[in-house]
């Protein structure tokens, strides 16, 4: 998000660059009313123009500039105060008044006394007979200084007045009005000014700065227009190709529920090498999992753990195991789940591990896993775990233990019918197994 200090420093720099710091060319028009003719003889008095400087004011302003350039601001201010004495006696014409206040504003700005500079500019604005250029510049400086002072409503007021009279649209003014509304959290009001700023820049064939795209995207986020935020982000990615934009792109796609594109963009971002945090890699893995690519999910999780980016905690190990299990890679699913189960406070992971071993026909490990599950306890459905281990006992020809497990499952009425079926099956299998064993012994004795 944009911060006031960032924009404040930006605007302050812009204001300082545009200040009238040079020579008397800033005064414009006829700088001095000539008092002598070409041969040094005193000319007859001429009518004073409202757009010229008399010799006295001209000389004082020149002294002010010299002292200012030597950074003797107190001295410059003292000389300027002499001019102000004539102002107080109403001895200055319109142009001289304007120049006097202009230099007061200039000196105050150099010394970062912005409230005093604002007062000087407001005095300038109240003068009669101002030119179009003078009014535009004064309104611009007032808006800029109020912005630096974080008086954003006043900044908007003066910038808006500038827009009302400006002969040419100023992209910078539109940007500043937009950012002022942003600082006031008036997000809907800010958007049209930022768009206008971009429109003017495009019409002039100028590049739009990256921070403008960032601001517009933030504004669309704040008004929850995620489709437009996505459009701005895509354009920013194409133009600037910055890692932060690439990383943000999948999140925005998820916000507008374009999940397939989200998964694809996560993959591209990873290939580009921009994913370097655990949350980013886990999000990528989750997207692959949700888009029916569990093996890719497992590989991302495994790589992140191997690189030391993803922590090998209970949740991440269990998720890695799930990805492999859904991908039908049970042999790879078991080791991380064993580690997760050892970390867990309950027996759920062990119960799931037991089912994986049963699928792999690793029945001894199946029984061991379920024993650990029952020891840790706190199972959501212990009845189902008893039924699962009963099957493993049957495969190991441990029928009595299987029957006992089925009887434990029968205590939950939800599994009562299934448990009775298992008890019947286990009892018959036990009888069949014992019959076969007896026949083998009798045959062995017959051929002895």
Image (spheres, rainbow, N blue to C red):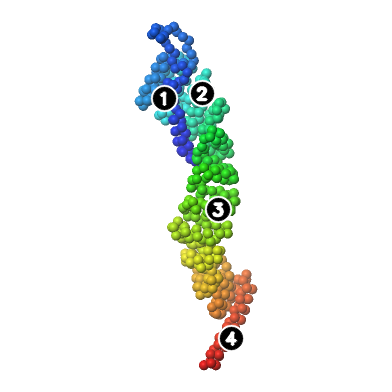
Q: Are marks 1 and 3 in contact (CB under 8 Å)?
A: no
Q: Nearer the viewer, residue 98 or 149?
A: 98
Task: Between residue 308 and residue 423, name the one nearer to us.
Answer: 308
Cα distance in 3D space between marks 1 and 3: 57 Å
Q: Which mark is residue 435?
A: 4
Q: Secondary structure at mark 3?
A: helix
Q: Residue at x 51, y 65 (%)?
A: 333
- Under circle 4, the secondary element is helix
The residues bearing labels 3 and 2 have C-alpha atoms spaced at a distance of: 54 Å
Q: Earlier in the sequence, mark 4 or mark 2?
A: 2
Q: CA distance from mark 3 to mark 4?
A: 60 Å
Q: What is the spatial separation of the Cα atoms under label 4 and label 1, in whole angstroms?
A: 114 Å
Q: Residues within 10 Å of mark 4 (few under 14, many from 20)?
A: few
Q: Which is in the foreground here, disc 4 or disc 1?
A: 1
Q: Residue 289 location, x and y as percent?
A: 55, 59
Please report whichever mark, 4 or 1, sits nearer to the chain's N-terminal start.
Answer: 1
- Mark sitting on residue 133: 2
Of pointers 1 and 3, the one earlier in the residue sequence: 1
Work out how far the residue at label 4 is from the one at label 2, CA to CA, in angstroms.
112 Å
Q: Nearer the viewer, residue 30 or 418?
A: 30
Can you tell which mark lies on residue 22? 1
The residue depicted at 39 percent of the width and 20 percent of the height is: 62
């Amino acid at each position: 998000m944009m911060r006031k200090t960032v924009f404040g420093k930006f605007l302050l720099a812009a204001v300082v660059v545009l200040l009238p710091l040079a020579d008397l060319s800033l005064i414009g028009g006829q700088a001095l009313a000539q008092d002598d003719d070409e041969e040094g003889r005193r000319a007859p008095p001429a009518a004073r123009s409202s757009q010229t400087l008399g010799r006295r004011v001209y000389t004082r302003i020149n002294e002010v500039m010299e002292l200012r350039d030597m950074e003797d601001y107190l001295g410059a201010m003292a000389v300027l105060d002499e001019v102000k004495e004539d102002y107080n006696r109403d001895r200055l014409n319109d142009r001289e008044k304007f120049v006097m206040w202009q230099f007061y504003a200039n000196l105050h700005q150099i010394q970062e006394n912005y409230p005093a500079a604002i007062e000087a500019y407001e005095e300038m604005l109240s003068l009669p007979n101002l030119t179009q250029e003078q009014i535009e510049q004064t309104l611009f400086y007032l808006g800029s200084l109020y912005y630096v002072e974080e008086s954003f409503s006043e900044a908007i007021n003066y910038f808006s007045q500038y827009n009302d009279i400006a002969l040419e649209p100023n992209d910078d003014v539109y940007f500043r009005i937009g950012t002022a509304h942003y600082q006031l959290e008036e997000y809907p009001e800010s958007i049209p000014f930022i768009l206008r700023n971009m429109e003017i820049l495009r019409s002039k064939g100028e590049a739009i700065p990256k921070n403008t795209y960032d601001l517009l995207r933030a504004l669309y986020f704040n008004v929850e227009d995620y489709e437009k935020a996505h459009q701005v982000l895509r354009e920013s990615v194409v133009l600037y190709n910055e890692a932060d934009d690439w990383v943000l792109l999948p999140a925005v796609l998820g916000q507008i529920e374009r999940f397939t594109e989200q998964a694809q963009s996560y993959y591209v971002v990873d290939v580009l090498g921009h994913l370097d945090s655990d949350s980013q890699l886990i999000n990528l893995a989750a997207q692959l999992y949700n888009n029916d690519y569990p093996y890719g999910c497992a590989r991302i999780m495994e790589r992140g753990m191997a690189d030391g980016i993803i922590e090998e905690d209970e949740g991440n190990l269990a998720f890695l195991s799930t990805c492999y299990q859904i991908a039908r890679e049970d042999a790879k699913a078991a080791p991380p789940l064993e580690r997760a189960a050892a970390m867990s406070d309950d027996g759920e992971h062990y119960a799931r591990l037991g089912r994986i071993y049963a699928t792999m026909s690793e029945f001894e490990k199946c029984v061991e896993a379920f024993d650990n599950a029952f020891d840790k306890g706190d199972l959501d459905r212990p009845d189902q775990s008893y039924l699962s281990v009963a099957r493993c006992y049957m495969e190991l020809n441990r029928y009595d233990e299987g029957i006992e497990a089925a009887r434990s499952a029968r205590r939950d009425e939800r599994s009562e019918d299934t448990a009775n079926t298992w008890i019947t099956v286990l009892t018959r299998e036990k009888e069949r197994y014992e019959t076969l064993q007896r026949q083998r012994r009798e045959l062995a004795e017959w051929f002895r």
